[in-house]
Amino acid sequence: MTESPLRIGISCYPSVGGSGILATALGVDLARRGHEVHFISYERPFRLPPDEPRVTFHPVHIQGYGLFKHPDYTLPLAVKMTEVVRERHLDILHAHYAVPHATAAVLARDWLPEELRPGVVATLHGTDTTLLGRDPGYAPAIRHALGKVDAITTVSEFLRCDTARLVDIDHPIQVIPNFFSPRRPHRSRRAVRAELGLGDREAMILHMSNLRPVKRIDLLLEATARIRPRESFRLVVVAGGDFAPFREQVRRLGLEDRVVVRENVSLIEDYVAAADLGLITSETESFCLSILEAMTFGCPTVATAVGGIPEVIEHGKSGLLVPFGDAEGLAREVESLISSPRLRTTLGRAAQQRARDLYSADRVVPAYVDLYHRVRAQRQAVAAHPTLPQI
Ligand code: GMT
């Protein structure tokens, strides 16, 4: 490492979800590059390896006072942030999501004496501006936090434009895309396909998501029911949520023998490496990390052309895009990939190359490190000359 190591606090949602996965991968990669990383959250992020050198997890304890009908998380989080900043002399607090993480980080910074104040970076992942930003119960809090942080990043150009429409700030919003560093699969492609009950002539269509309403599992199943011939594929759903509510639709569409579901998967790489193509039917998506996960393994995806997805996939080159809602169009594009191994290989190779060129850790993590250094330098200047304007 040429530049001095930094001490970085990261707050994220620790459960299954793209933002937590990205924040965890970022922290691990920063630590491997020599920085000291402190995760501050109510639970240990689920993809955080145990005993990672230079990584510490600081749990936030939420009190269940009888007085509060709904326990508060933002304040205990902010208090824990101040403790960690004081004890570990953090340079940066990096909040993934405006609420509550950026709000808590801004509070924590304001409670600390000037000379201890860390730089605060907020990374937006989607829902905080695309959904909550338009909710009158949250919008003022989001605008306030984003107006007070030292730097804002978004994971796509789509989200940058959306955020700029929402908040009126004078510093630029920087796009730093997601990255993915795959772990080595534990099982062979053959072993995974055998576990899933896939026949030799069946293509494995992979859908990976947390099944939230924006993922439009109804459209996924609707499109799947239109794929011909029926015996040519299995849809494998690697679910970061409960699939039970969708069983009735599976039955109604006569898809019981075509859909295989796996919940609580700890090593998604096993499934991605065994897949022939991905299928994503979201109605909004600021980036879609699972498309990138597939690309990394040379697996092309058919996806709805929404939000930031067209930045990740170039239609016809590294995957196939279909207008949102077009179940028939999705089925036709999936069929084109099932029937042509050559097209799958061509798109898959281009996808893998694109993932390497644009979305690898080596490409993306240094952009965060540069930003941290800029923010820290600016903070130090403010601490030395408190009359300087804030960043
Ligand atoms: O999409 C989800 O349900 C999870 C969500 C999250 O906050 O964890 O994902 C968001 O952040 C990911 C990582 O940056 C992006 O890849 C997803 O596109 C984004 N989801 C949406 O915009 C709906």
Image (tube, helix red, strand yellow):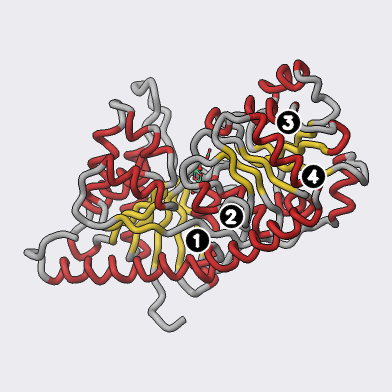
Assess whether mark 1 and mark 2 are in contact (beta carbons under 8 angstroms): yes
Q: CA distance from mark 4 to mark 1?
A: 38 Å
Q: Residue 130 occupies which quadrant of the picture?
A: top left
**Comparing labels 4 and 1, the label whose residue is closer to the camera:** 4
Say whether disc 3 or disc 2 marks the residue closer to the N-terminus. 2
Q: Amino acid at mark 1?
A: Gly
Can you see residue 19? no
Q: Amino acid at mark 3?
A: Thr
Label of residue 245 in the image? none
The extreme left residue here reads 387
Q: Amino acid at mark 2?
A: Leu
Label of residue 224 in the image? 3
Q: Residues within 10 Å of mark 1 (few under 14, many from 20)?
A: many
For label 2, the residue is 48
Above or below, 100 relative to 39: above
Q: CA distance from mark 2 to mark 4?
A: 36 Å
For label 1, the residue is 27
Q: Could you tell me residue 319's position as x and y percent?
A: 64, 51
Say whether disc 1 or disc 3 marks the residue closer to the N-terminus. 1
Say whether disc 2 or disc 1 marks the residue closer to the N-terminus. 1
Q: Residues within 10 Å of mark 2 (few under 14, many from 20)?
A: some
**Comparing labels 4 and 3, the label whose residue is closer to the camera:** 4
Q: CA distance from mark 3 to mark 2?
A: 34 Å
The front one of 213 and 54 is 213
For label 4, the residue is 338
The front one of 295 and 383 is 295
Query: Which residue is at 40% across, 63% downward?
Result: 8
Q: CA distance from mark 2 to mark 1?
A: 9 Å
Element marked by disc 4: helix
Assess whether mark 3 and mark 1 are in contact (beta carbons under 8 angstroms): no
Say whether disc 4 or disc 1 marks the residue closer to the N-terminus. 1
